[in-house]
Amino acid sequence: MKAPTFCESGRRRGEAVLLAVLAFVVALVGVLAVPAERAEAMEAVKCTGRPNSEDDPTVIMGATESRITFEASIAEGEGVSSLTLHIPDGTTFGTDDLAVTLLTGDDLMTRNEVDYTETVDGQDLTLEFAEPITQEGHLNILVYDVFFPTDGGEMQVEATYELADGTEESIEGIPAIPVEGISLTESISQWLEEQPWVQAWNSNRFLHLFFDPSLLVTSFPVVLTGFFMSISIVAVAFPLAIPMGLLLALMRISKLRLLRGIATTYVNIVRGTPLFLQIYVAFFGLPLAGIQIPNFILGVTVMCMNSGAYMCEIFRAGILSISKGQTEAARSLGMNGAQTMFYVILPQMFRIVIPNLTSEFIVLYKDTSLLAAVGIMELVMYARTIVASTGSITPYIVAALFYLVITLPLSKVTRHLEDRVRGHHTRKHAIEPEPASEKGATNE
Amino acid sequence: MSDAVVNEAEKNDAAAATGDEPILRIVDLHKSFGQTVVLRGIDIDIHRGEVVVVLGPSGSGKSTMLRCLNRLEEPTSGKIFFEGQDITDPKTDVNDVRKRMGMVFQQFNLFPHLDALHNVMLAQQKVLGRSAEEAERVAREQLARVGLAERADYYPDELSGGQQQRVAIARALAMEPHVMLFDEATSALDPELVRGVLDVMRELAEQGMTMVVVTHEMGFARDVADRVVFMEGGYVVEEGAPEQLFTNPKSPRTAEFLGSIN
């Protein structure tokens, strides 16, 4: 690379001599050519960050302590008087442990102390050398206490240097440092791990095993994914189970023996066997029979069919709890059986069964955990993967919190609704005492 | 199909009215619940515009008899003719019969999920096929008739027992029935609320409604009834004009019952 450049400038000088009339131009070219030639006074050799990931020894992560190693070659006799490193924005660094070494010799094995003073101006770290460096070699700089930005990205370090004659040049071709971003929870977790109270907390074996604060934080986003899966299973299965339960309930109170028999048999089998077993039969039996159904759909179907049987009994009890007088009143007005059911009985029944339906929702939501056994990536399954890799039970505690976040408020709602069904609801109008003469007065 | 039946029935009515044919004719009505015999052969004729009050001690079968009239109870044997039609015939469309026969219950049986207005509107829309506007117009009219125009948007549990029963009467009247059946309509009411309901019933009688009234209200029977039927042990013991039955009962059982009441 040097040779052709010399040739070129040499040729240009030759041209300047031959073409005397252009002496002024040649002089101008010479002025311009000098910096181009001197740009090679320092050249980038390397610029790296120290890997700092616990999981992968080649990865540099953001918001985690690291170190920048910068090395540049110095050509002999150039006399570099100062060097300024521009650390990328968002990256913090320390100067206490700064190490500046000049490596010389054929194999660059000779380490020379460099006498310098450093100044920091924002992201610029400037090293003023006591004497301009004229020796050929590699200038090696280690910057410690480096924290790259949390989001990560390609970190480009820039460098400029000043020669003894006062010209300033920049070093081209510095390789960027690839930094992987870390999530907010990872950074919180890392911060937590360094806190003395967390370390004290974790020194208790029980607390460390079940309630490791940093693992609580890192498990959260992972288990959250499972939470969404569990919720979506329930969100599809529960609404579908309602019409199914209603149909079964109507069949069970039907006058037709066949319908009654079918519904009763179904309900008894489903309620009389563990859901776990039903899941196994569906997930292992159907594929063996050559029926391939995607896991999510099959999971939803099993949950829905199970819940439908329980809802059948809730609805049936609700229908039977409505006074016979309601049916008689409706029928005495000429309404047929179906009209009576749909306009008189069912609207009242739904009001009565809402607390029980809420309880059934809670049960169904908790029972989605059984789907972990057949590999559906729901709440418990995600928690289990972290438990397997960390050996801590804490992710299960996180999973428990995700269940409670739904079930506790719903239980409270259920209690409230039960009170309302018992007749403690607020009336829009108060009963007014009816004067005995009220109607009589209007008659007269 | 059902319209045709109605028209047919109405023609029969017209013919019956002129020929003084009873609107309701109960012939040898028997009813048993399992081994328990409740009605042992009841024969009563009820004429158009007549108010018949049925008296009798508890367990005499008077409510069961009334409930057989719109087949809320299936008669064990015997026949009931309503506007010339045998309603005990299995081929009879019982819903069609019921829409011409209003019933008021001891326990009111208002639909608790609907306000007074919609209690009165529901069957009009679903059974008679009236539009919402038409049903509402009729409902407000009938609520006004029972003195509850101001309570249209009240739910049953916001109304007193007497008001509920009057809404129930309005609900039955909105179907424009040819006969009204009252099954101990005031028995569940506090004494001070009874009068309002009885006044509505009295007014209804004055307007010429055919009524079969099972009650313990002797005053009402005496003042309003065209005829009083006294039942005991599943039989009709005695029937007659109220002044005759109250002042000079033929049967010692009737006398004893009236004596125990007064």
Image (cartoon, coloured by chain):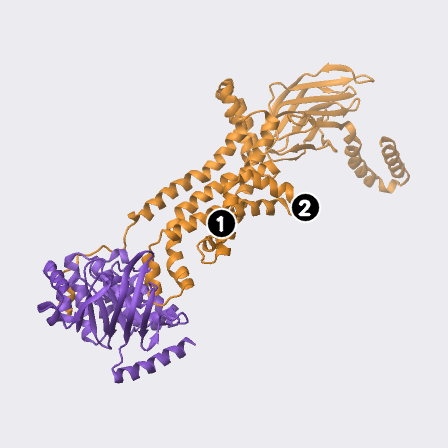
Chain colours: A orange, B purple
Lateral position of residue B34 relative to residue B150, left or right: right
Which numbered disc, 2 or 1, marks the residue that appears first in the sequence? 1
Give the secondary structure at mark 1: helix
- Tell me which residue sits at (52%, 34%) in the image: A399
Query: Which secondary structure, mark 2?
Result: loop
- Alpha-carbon neighbours of circle 2 within 10 Å: few (<14), some, or many (≥20)? few
Rendered view: A123 above or below B180: above
In the rendered image, the vertical position of residue B232 relative to residue A43, given as above or below: below
Q: Chain of mark 1?
A: A
Query: Which residue lies under the disc numbered 2?
Result: A289
Image height check: is B212 above or below A263?
A: below
Q: Quadrant of residue A119?
A: top right
Picture quarter with the N terminus of chain B: bottom left
Using the image as rendered, state which of residue B262 and residue B105 is in the foreground: B262
Q: Is residue A160 left or right of residue B17?
A: right
Q: Residue under circle 1?
A: A264
Q: CA distance from mark 2 to mark 1?
A: 27 Å
**Where does the image place residue A228, in percent across and percent down from the top left?**
54, 42
Callout 1, which amino acid? Thr
Q: Nearer the viewer, residue B225 or A58?
A: B225
Q: Residue at x 34, y 56 (%)?
A: B34
Residue A192: where, in percent of width, then height?
A: 52, 25
Q: Is label 2 in contact with label 1 (beta carbons under 8 Å)?
A: no
Q: Residue at x 29, y 82 (%)?
A: B16
In the rendering, at what x and y percent does residue A167 appear? 72, 30
Quick one: B16 or A415, which is closer to the camera? B16
